[in-house]
Structure formats: C-alpha cells, structure tokens
Image (cartoon, coloured by chain):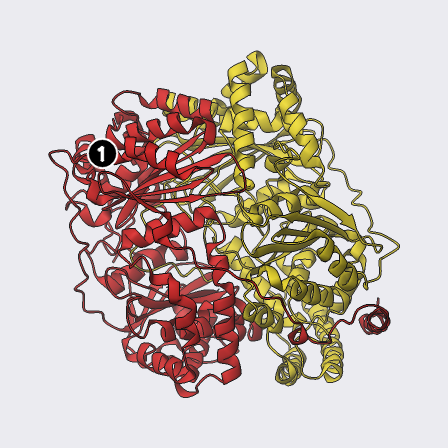
Chain colours: A red, B yellow
Amino acid sequence: MNRLAKNAALLAAFAATTALGQAIPDRPEKLTYPAISWEVPKAKDAKVVLKNKVPAYLVADPSGVPLVRVSVWWRGGAYLDPAGKEGLASLFGSQLAVGGTQKTDAAKLEDRLEALAATLSSSCGPTSGGIHIRVQEKDLAEGLALLMQALTQPAFAQDRLDLAKKNARQGLERRNDAVTSIAQLQMPALLFGEGFFATERTTAASLDAITREDLLALHASLLHPANLVVEVSGKLERRAMTDLLNRTVGAIKAGPAAKPSPKVPLPEFARKPGLYVTDKDAPQAMLQWAFPGMRRSDPDWYPAMVMNHVLGGGGFAARLMKKIRSDEGLTYGVRTQLGEGPYWRGDLTGGLQTKNATVAYALRLALAEMQRLKDEPLTEAELASIKDGLVEAFPAQWGSRQAVANRFADENLNGWPEDWWLDYREKVKAVTAADVQKAARKLLDFEKMVVLAVGKASEIEAGDADHPGALKDAAKLPLARLPLRDPLTLKPIP
Amino acid sequence: MTVFRGRAPAALLAAAILAAPLSAQELNVVERTLPNGMKLLMVPRHDQPTISCGWLARVGSANERPGITGLAHLFEHMMFKGTTTIGTRDAARDAELNRAQDEVQAQIREEMTLLREKQRRGEIADMMSPAARTPRLQELLSKFDALVKEQRALIVKDEMDKVYQENGATGLNASTSQDRTFYIVGLPSNKLELWMWLESDRLGSPVFREFYSERNVILEERRQTLESRPGGLVNEAFNAMTWMAHPYHWEVIGWPSDIAQVTREQANEFFATYYAPNNLTAILVGDLDVEKTFALAERYFGRIPANPKGVPPVVTLEPAQPAEQRMVAEVETTPSAEVDYKAVPAVHADAAALQVLGVVLGGPPMMGRPGMGGPMRPPSGRLHKALVLDQKAATRASASFRGQKYGGLFYVSATPAPGKRPDEVEPLLYAELDKVLKDGVTDDELARAKNAIRVAWYSRLESNAGIRESLAQAESAGTWRDLLGSQKKVEAVTREDVQRVAKKYLVKEGRNVLLTTRKGGGEGMPRRRPGGMPPGGMPGGAPALAPAPAPAPASAPTPEVKG
C-alpha cells in the first residue's frame, strides 16, 4: 500500500472526526491536565525502632494481595574479607538461607519452605547484604521463624557449601567469556587499583581456602543489632507487625564475638588517566569511560544530576543516545550514570557496545557532545523540559510499596539523611542553565578521564574506514594495552 | 531492571501466567471494544497517582517469512520515529526526502543483487564488507548520506521521547516477541490524555523516518544481544534446528542478510496489515476512571479505520518431529546439557498439567525481587535434588514448560559438575524423567506445585506494571480471559494428568538435545534459554563501577524478560 496515499486518507478521516467530536488539539503541548496531589513518602512515617534499637521500615500494601516480604539487611560485606580468603562475604551471603540451621537441617528447611510456597533467599555484596523472605500472609509467623533461625543459628551445611564453591568456581571461569565481563574486571582495577575491595579480588585459591568455620566466624561478628536494618512490605497491620518484629528481630542480642562493622575503607589509588585497550576476539567491543564525580551530599549534586541526564542518563532523549544511536546507528544503546557515593565520591561513568572498528569514532562523538555541554549553556526550553520531566516522574520512583520500603532501608544502610528526598523536586527546579554548564566544566575534565575498550585491539586502535581516525587521536591521553587476566588467579596474562 | 525498547527477542513465559489462578476478587478487569475493533482492557487501582499504559499488536516474528525475517522487530523501532506531526519541522519536505531516499536505496539494492551474485560465485567473500563495494555502490552510498544529512536538519530528534519525558513518563519502551509487539509507558495519572494523543497519532499517521539507518542500530543490537553473548550463535542454530518448519525457526531479531535488505515498502505493507485497530489491544492499569478513559479512547483511537481484511493466519504447523535431533557444540562458556521437548501452545488443554510437571521437576517459576535486582529464589525441584544434591553430578539442574501462541517446549537442562561431561549428565536427566513416566508424581508434590503457581501469580498482582505484563502475555497467546480458565485448569490437574502429559510429550522422538563443552577445554555454564536476555543489563552494558558487584552465582537464572 502506498504510504502517502494512506496517510492522506487517514488525515482526512482525522479532520472529519475532529470536526464532529470534541476537538483534538493539533499538538500535544496544547493539552491541559488536571492537577494531582502527591506527597513524598516519609521514612519517619514508616519507621519503627525495635527494642534492640534496630530500625525497621514498614510499608503496608492496601491492594489486598496476600503476600508479605521481610528483609533483614546487615552492614558488612566483601570489604571485610580477610587476605587469602577473598570471596568469603559473597559465599556467606549465598549460604545463610540455604545451609540449614542448628535446629532444622538444610533439606528439612527447604521442605518447610516448599510446603508454605515461601521463598527464603540471601546474598551479600561489597558493603552490605540481606536475608529475605516472601511468604503468604497466613504463614507469616512460621516463615519469619524460619528466617530467624537462618539468620541467628545458621548451620552452613558442608555439602551446600561445597556446591556453592563449585558454582562460584565456574563463575570465575566465565570471567573472560564476554567483553562485558572482562570490562567488569578491568575498569574497577583502573579506578581503584589492585587489592581494594571494589576491584574483583576473588581467586580460585582464595575461594578454595574458605572453610565453614570462616563463615561461622563472619556470622558471629556480623550479628550485632547495630549492623541491622529491617524492611517489610505487603499485607500487614502496623501494630501487629511491630509486635512480631519485636519478638523476633528485636530480640537479637549481640553475641560475644559480635561487633558493629568497621567503617568501609576509602580508596587511596592514584588513577592514571589514559586510553586502555584489552584484546579479546569478539564481534563487538565494549567501550567505557569514567570521570571523577562527587557524593550525593555535594552542593553541586543537583546541577550535576541534571547535566548527566542531558548527556546520557535520560534514556532516548539524552544527547549521546540521539547522536550515537539514533543519528549514526553505531550502537544499540549508550548511557551515562552519576555515582552518588556513599562512602567516597562516585564517578561519572558511561559506556556502549559497538563494532570494533567504530569504537574510536563513537568515542570522538561522545567527547564532542561532552565538549558541547561545556561550551554552550542549555537553552531555557531544554532546561525546562528536563526539569519538568524529573519533577513529574518523581512519584513513579515510589511506584510500589516494596520499592518504597526498599528505598528507606537502603538509604539507612548507606547512611543518607532520612529527609533527603523531601525537597528533591524543589532542588531540581532551582537548577539553572549556568549551574549545569558549570557542572559540565567541573566534571567532564578530559585530562582526568579513564577510557577502556575491550575487543579486537588492532581493529579498535585502527578505527573505521568510513570515519577515519585512530583511537590514539580521539583524546590527548596515553594509549596503553591492558592484558587480559587469568580468570582463576587474576594475574595479567603476558 | 532497565529495559530498552528494541531490547531483543523476547522470551514469553506465557504459560507461567496462563496457568496461574485468578479470581474476580483479585483482579478487576473491564473490557471494552471500540467500533473499529480495538480492544481496551482497564484495571482501576487507585493506590498511587500513576497509570501503567500499553498496547499490543498481535504480530511478531511468527508472522514473517524468509526474506523479511526481523521485520516485526525493525518495525517496533520505526514506531518511535515520529508521525506527520511529531518528529519533523517540515512534513512535506520530509516526505520528499523519504521518497528520494527510497529511490537511491532501490539502486543500492540493485548493486547489492550484483554483489550477492558475486558472492554466490565466490568472487567476493562478504558482500556486506566495505572492501567489496563497487565504485557505483560507494557513489550511491554517498548520495544517500547527503539525503540523510538534509533530512536530519528537518528532524526533531526523538520528539516523542521528549514530549513523554517532560511530562513525567517513565519506562517508555517496546518489545517484540515471536507472537506480539508491545508498546509501554508509565505516566502520572493526570496525563492519560497525552498517552491517547501520542499513541493514536503514531497509529494513525506514522512516518518511518531514518528507516535505513535504523537497520544499522539493529545489526548492532544483534551483535550485542546475540553474537557477542557466549554461545549466542549456537543458541540461534539450536533453535533453528528445533523448529524445522514453523516461523519460530528464526530468532525475533532476524537473519542479518534480511535485516540489511528490508525495504520501506515492505514495512508499509506490514503496518497496513498488522497495525489496524482490530488487531490491537490496549491495556491500562492504575489510577483511572473507566468511563472517562473509554470516552477518551473512543475520541482518539476511534478515528483510526479498521482493516476489514483482518490478518492472515499463520498456517504452517510444526510437523511431528520424526526423530531425536542433536547438536554438539563448543562454546566459550561453561558446559551444559539441555533437552527441549516439543510440547503444546500456551492455551492448549494440556498446558496446565505440563506447567505443574515443570514445577515438580524444576521448582517454582524463578522470581527475583522485581525492579531491584537482589537475590533469586534458591533452586529446588526433583532434578536439583537428584542431580545436584544427591548425585553431585551437576551444579545446576532445572526444568520448565514454556507455552507460546503456536507451540511450546518443555525444557530440561543441567550444568555438569567439575569433572563431569555433558554427555554423562544427559542420561541422569532421562532417569529422573523416567521415574515420572513410571510412577507419576505424589499428592504432596502436586499440591505444592499448585501453591507455588498461585503465589507466583499473587506476586504479579503487586504492581500496575506486573498486571499489565500478565494481561499482555495472555492477550498475545489468546485472550486475557484465558487467565480465568487457566486457574481452574491448574486447580483441576490430577496426578494422572501429570503422568499422562509426561508420557505423551517427553518422548525420545520429541527430543532436541544440545550438548556444549567449553571451547579449548575447561569448565563452563549453562547456555541461555533461547530469547532470554541477561538480567538487569542495559544496552551499552556499562556496569555500575563502584563498588563492584559480588560474583554472580554460576547458576544465575534468567528471570522473565521482555524483548
């Protein structure tokens, strides 16, 4: 069918309908909308302090879905791993919920959970971890009792631990399988140096060295009320839930070995800005970059956030997406992120995947867009559009009860002030075009940039015939090859 | 989870939903149909001032044929390129430039035909390589680039994204599966009319701008989501082996040769056939008033004419598989043994019993903490207990039934433990299946599986977006009313039913076996299920850089994902 003829016919139909019915405006900007009122959920309204001083955030779901979710989070993670036993916190996290308890062995625990159609799971990351249950409201008491057994009296059954170590070992073996996973090893090493917990440290040897006793010892030191935060959402009645929590999590006392987790260490690594290339035979390369950023508490945070949104944080409307994907067809997606801390300043990072040969061109395009943000202030219309979007989309960030409870718990774990979000919209509205330009000039400092490309090194470095230019000429930074690491030892492969 | 539009080929766990219990008290769906045939499903939920919006076209890669594979998905991308009103400063000149581009592209295709002939004769290695271009082709490409540049000056780039975004929209996206294409966005509830305006505009007067350059985006998407994925190309070949005749044979993203050659004319025909209102269902879940919403829909979508011819049926039936099919491959990841049995579509009378069987063998549907990453349900089910815990022959073992619109597969797979080969693990899988064939399942297993399916359904009802997804999946395989019937079907499943479907479908002739070992030796991990996408990934794949995530468990399951 001829598209033009069809469109003409449709336009005629549109016009006719419009004349008969209620008018449809010719542009969406002409629509008017009723006001809606919405208030930011307040952490203090959800908060209950249990009798052992553990904070709990309770968010009831009025929809009537008969499920309850309870999470108990702890401060402490991979940064606590002893030398030679890197990977301990991660294994601990994976085993807490599945290794059985002193009262109920692993198979019996699995059987009870299956009988209740309840899900009990746990994990531990770099700085914190948690144990979680999803259970039907009618089975809450038993479900929570099982969670408490696992949390306070874990058995860490040897056969489950052996299985987890085999699984973890297979995970290590996959480290060099994809450009994305290689970049996950290399980039943190460039930003934080070797040996720091934010850089991958687990080796086959360190994994092998971890014993059941190590898990028990970590558990004994972590289980201190000062380390815990509780998150509850779903079908619940506040008073009854508070009572139940006080009888369970609220009754946890510090054992003899328990202590508040030490402070998360800060990186002391001096970064070497540069263009780094890791050779990997792959049809498409991964390109990433990073600039030093700031903490969320920085006075320039809001302008920086708006700037990041314009550059690459704002999805399809962001400038990098328009240029590199939409105009040039060089990638499926490009995005930037402004890290918020919380323990040290975050980084402004970004990345994309593209053909090996077009890495240099894509990088040039990205840097040119960054330069434009430094050179030209946003127009007032552009700024207003971005700010309106951030403000109007804010309620959606609190879209489910689970998300609300999770945010409160997460903010507490990370030590952010409880009232942080209350004036978010006002702070966004106050950002000016000059502020954004200032943030761009401050953050997008090419001399401090670390760039990593993983893919076919020779093609990456040579550039593209249709868009000539070698990688070394994309930025005034030294170019260096970064060898792959042995996936089991993490040592560079010569 | 970040999901981007065009995010590749889609896994539909339709069965997980279709067989889930539902009662009128749990979900209040109001169905209305416009005079032009467009169906509207509305679910009022007044808890938060937001609405999860979407509409789906009952078209996917199953409606394609060789030569135009990938078109349904390319089309999904084109639906974001604007209309006669949105996306251009000068609609008339824009249309002229599109026509001029089409003419140059027609000449380019003539050159490509010559190159294809040269490749056929072995005179060139790869017709797509820049080195193979003839002088005329290079000249035409330059001419085309000039037209694109001229048009770009008139384009208001991604204007629909911009209008949505400044009005507080979130999650604007679309996805394509074998069976359907789904366009979604979340909005503040006072902006519902904006959705009506923009969506009826792009259905009523779309312009497929930047058509030819978007093919390059899709080739990059294919590289990122399929070719760069460890084992991705083997997955594609295995899927093509499994489905010999039915259009499920090709991946949603299509074959590269077809993507590079598809024409605007083909896209126009596709749109006229499949995007008429009588092939669409709109789904709105959230803070809405049913009557006002329907009145708005009548005003906006009612102006789009129906396609009286309807859509042609997909007539190809997958023939009964005459023999077991096997593929043995080396991939750059952990070894795996997978057996996929031909089964039934999601709405088939046997689907509920197959779903129960999948839960007994493989544990409940994997369910993470949606939207916030976090840990997954620990593994369970007969296969895990036998192969992983008791025999210690595998580090992961799973089973599930996945029913789609035109067919379904029953999946069984395991990751060999270190020191075990996939061909050693394969018979252990069969041994567990044989126990079901011989002795069936227990009453307790049956009751637990039904409970697990019910709880999985409840967890979908917790958010507007979860309800929207459930309705969309049901509509893509049948109608949302199948949700009601499937509740009864699951509740009615007996031990005899489970044993009967096991005997009927888990037969040797129905097997498709994929055994993979690590390229160059070593250990490895399960291949990903066809159509799956990595959890929580983003296009570009830039990870959060600090602090680094804990290593993923080796058997990290793939949660349900959108295309």
* Residue type at tag 1: Ile
Q: What residue is pinned by disc 1?
A: A252
Instruction: Determine the residue located farthest toward the top in the rendered image.
Output: B439
Q: Is residue A92 left or right of residue A43?
A: left
Residue A39 place in picture, x, y as percent: 46, 59
Q: Nearer the viewer, residue B112 or B529?
A: B529
Chain assignment, label 1: A
Residue at 58%, 26% (x, y): give it.
Answer: B356
Q: Quadrant of residue A483?
A: bottom left
Instruction: Determine the residue located farthest toward the right in the rendered image.
Output: B308
Q: Is residue A344 above or below residue A67?
A: below
Residue at 52%, 29% (x, y): give it.
Answer: B452
Q: Nearer the viewer, residue A337 or B484?
A: B484
Instruction: Determine the residue located farthest toward the bottom in the rendered image.
Output: A375
User: Is the residue marked by circle 1 packed among few (<14), some (14-19), or many (20+) residues within 10 Å?
Assistant: some
Residue A55 place in picture, x, y as percent: 28, 45
Residue at 16%, 39% (x, y): give it.
Answer: A221
Q: Is residue A311 above or below residue A152?
A: below
Residue B4 place in picture, x, y as percent: 54, 59
Q: Is residue B298 visible?
A: yes
Q: Is residue B37 left or right of residue B244?
A: right
Q: Secondary structure at mark 1?
A: loop
Q: Is residue B447 left or right of residue A419?
A: right
Q: Quadrant of residue A119?
A: top left
